[in-house]
Amino acid sequence: VRSPVFLIPVLEPNYSTTMIPSKGRDPEKQEHLTPLVILAGWLGCQTKLLDRYAKLYQDIFNGCTVLRKIASPLMIVMAATTKTANAQFNNLYNVKSMEDFAKDIIREIATIPCSCILFHCFSNGGCFLWESIRGLVQTDLKYDSIKNNLCGIIFDSSPAYYSGCDELFHNAFKFCSSSDQTKIRNYIKERQISAGIDSFVTSSQKRSQDYWESMKNCDFPVQSLYICSRNDTLTPFEELYELIQYRVTTLGSDRIWCTIFENSPHCRHILTHPTQYRDIMELFLKSCLIKNANARDDEVTLENTNSTILVKEVKFPSLL
């Protein structure tokens, strides 16, 4: 069995970081701020299943605020088949659109003081939510503070390539409760009746293509880490790896990081490879903190060496 592949910049993991405000900033207001992490769960995820990830972030950061956000299965399926919210179906099934869910989360984020923001999305359930949040913060000036404070995105078993209503798309429904599966089947049937089967299939396929292109060509100016597996049955490896390679080529290996496991189930990498998972997360998150401080002209203290460095002086050679 081959070891995990790390396509990452080099950074020593054996230290912890403390943010030191730059001149002109109020240390009384800054010194106790910690990172804010948003965990966006997969289709069929439960809040308790995100606890191990929250603990990992707490351990690495020595304290942080963690929000666990899980879109309902029907909300995810609606987002997978059309990006434009349909009030008729949202009201019929009493479910929010993904965009409205994203707006609620952004409003909550705006109330939480933090040193920086990180977004961790699992499978397409998390990616559809990230897609909506990204669209809002990129186009609306009132969200600039959130956009400017976002310093890292982790794509965990995501994004997953799908094509409209193919077998892979339906296989994901198996992880939902029977009641959620019934809602999904009824929704798809209603959409097919309303639009016609051919039209529904065509529009769903176009939506999947647009989604994939948006994930591939996203130029959001923060570091991204992709954690994936060659034998993931719900996130096809070849398509995802092509996307990652394209993003490394266009944006650079300092912006796009990747960890590939040889044998690890969908959204279970933290369980099948706990040591490697923690190592890559620690490397990536500390790099995000340093780059975020660099952008703000702050300093970072490496506590085990009792030294303070200006992050502008830190360079990360590429392995690619």
Image (spheres, rainbow, N blue to C red):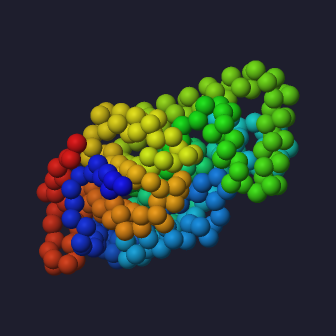
Q: Looking at the image, how many numbered discs can be counted on the residues?
A: 0
18 lies left or right of 81: left
Q: Position of residue 278 (x, y in %)?
A: 38, 66
315 up-or-down from 243: above or below? below
Q: Nearer the viewer, residue 303 or 273?
A: 273
Determine whether, in the image, residue 144 is placed left or right of residue 98. Answer: left
Q: Residue at x 32, y 71 (%)?
A: 26
Q: Is residue 53 left or right of residue 25?
A: right
Q: Position of residue 49 (x, y in %)?
A: 59, 67
**Residue beneath the point at 83% across and 35% down:** 189
Which one is in front, 311 or 284?
Answer: 284
* On screen, residue 12 above or below 220: below
**Camera-nearest residue between 192 and 23:** 192
Residue 266 shows up from this direction: yes
| Quadrant containing the C terminus in the rendered view | top left
Which corner quadrant holds the N terminus? Answer: bottom left
Residue at horizontal 15 percent and vertical 66 percent from the top: 309
Q: Is residue 39 left or right of residue 258?
A: right
What is the x, y in percent for residue 176? 72, 54
Q: Residue 205 location in percent, x, y?
A: 63, 27
Residue 297 visible within the image: no
The answer to which image quadrant residue 292 occupies is bottom left
Above/below status of 15 relative to 146: below
The residue at 16%/71% (across/down) is 308
Which image quadrant for residue 195? top right
